[in-house]
Amino acid sequence: MSKLHDVRMKVRGELEAPPGLRRFGSGWISGVLGLVLGIAGLLLVISLLAPGVLAIPETQNIRDNPWYRIGIHIVLVAAFACSGLSLVLRKERTLGTCGVAVTLAAALLGGSQAAAVVAGRPPLFFGLDFFVLNVLFTGFLFIPLERIFAHHDEQPIFREEWREDLFYYLVSSLMVQMLTFLTFLPAKSVLVLVPLTQVRAWVAALPFAVQFVAIMFLTDMVQYWVHRAFHRVPWLWKFHSVHHSARSMDWMAGARMHFMEILVLRSMTVIPMYVLGFGAAAMNTYIFVVYLYSTFVHANLSWRFPVIEKILVTPRFHHWHHGIEEAAVDVNFSIHFPLLDKIFGTYHFPKDQWPEGYGLPGNPVPNGYLAQLKYPFQRKPNTSSTTS
Ligand SMILES: [Zn+2]
Ligand SMILES: [Zn+2]
């Protein structure tokens, strides 16, 4: 057990290595890529062993496509090659050795040809494949952008608290079935009580673009007030303060959200979209766009959008929402249209400026997923910050 702990600590130390040990040619990039792809490949192979339990029905078409297994094969070969390269280039062999080990484990379990050993689909399933695809897709999209266009260019990929935020990704991806069910439950109940048949028929007949913009606006309207309530009502703030406890902003920071908040926020915001009868195409497109959009506004990107930022929320606008300074408290609640903050008097967007830092004064929220899960329920909140 302590051996495993030692390996974990060594891997962590290597991932968080100082800049001098991460430079091009040091075997760090290949080592990290080898390990990440190796773990991704291993988890995808595991999901192939029990597809009914560890893969989501929405990926069935992808999994049935022959390219899915070819893709896993390429991931495993790339993991092996990168890890091998790191072993050649790097004196410290932890990353390379672990990368080779997880890739071999994936191969021993059947690799890309792994067949299901657990058949059927039980009522409860977990999105293990969704987690891998989610992180690979978002990470490979945003990490290069953040490397090239960073607002804080000294911030490493494995910055402080990256493990917590990755764990948030893991939990919300694994629990996707339960989250989706509970998210739509209130909206379905409202629809039973208020069928709105004629309104729904009229809305469904609107052009796609009109439906999409209407969903954005209505969702943001609800989101604005729920979000504002999470800031202003003291016991709700304890849940939302977890999201604001992030001291670094990047593509992973947005994932940090208390489970209860995810449920409340999502279930409230889908009510207008679901009840008013928008078409499936507009709703699904919106869900995909909002998933990328919320990652984007948290990202460590210095991009400026001189005209667009007056109409649509940009990273700089949402970074101000997370700002640590006095002027950034309870401002910029919108996630799509800054206009809502202008109308309701919570707009704060000084020209060309960024907040000095992120997080909460005094760091009242403890570190670690479980401690943060319990935090809102504690009678006396932990006032001292701990480091892990
Ligand atoms: Zn907030
Ligand atoms: Zn945020």
Image: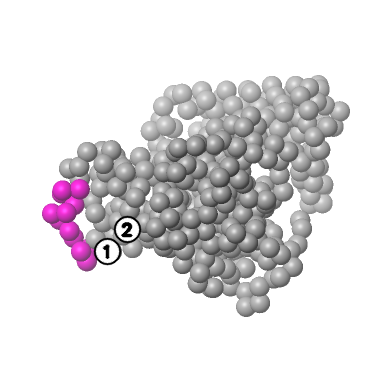
Q: Residue 190 has which mark? A: 1
Q: Residue 216 has which mark? A: none
Residue farthest left in this picture: 198
Q: What residue lies at 17% left-to-right and 58% top-to-bottom?
A: 196
| Residue 225 image point, x, y percent | 41, 62
| For residue 134, above or below residue 257 | above
Of the residues shown, which amino acid type is indicated by label 1?
A: Val
User: For the C terminus, which image quadrant?
Assistant: bottom right
Q: Front-most of 224 and 328?
A: 328
Colour scheme:
one colour
| Residue 337 image point, x, y percent | 41, 49
Residue farthest front in this picture: 351
Tell whether label 2 touches label 1 (CB within 8 Å): yes
Magenta stretch: residue 197 in it? yes
Q: Front-most of 122 and 256?
A: 256
Q: What residue lies at 38% left-to-right and 33% top-to-bottom?
A: 61
Residues in magenta? Answer: 192-203
Residue farthest bottom in this picture: 379
Q: Which residue is mark 2?
A: 271
Q: What residue lies at 43% left-to-right and 55% top-to-bottom?
A: 342
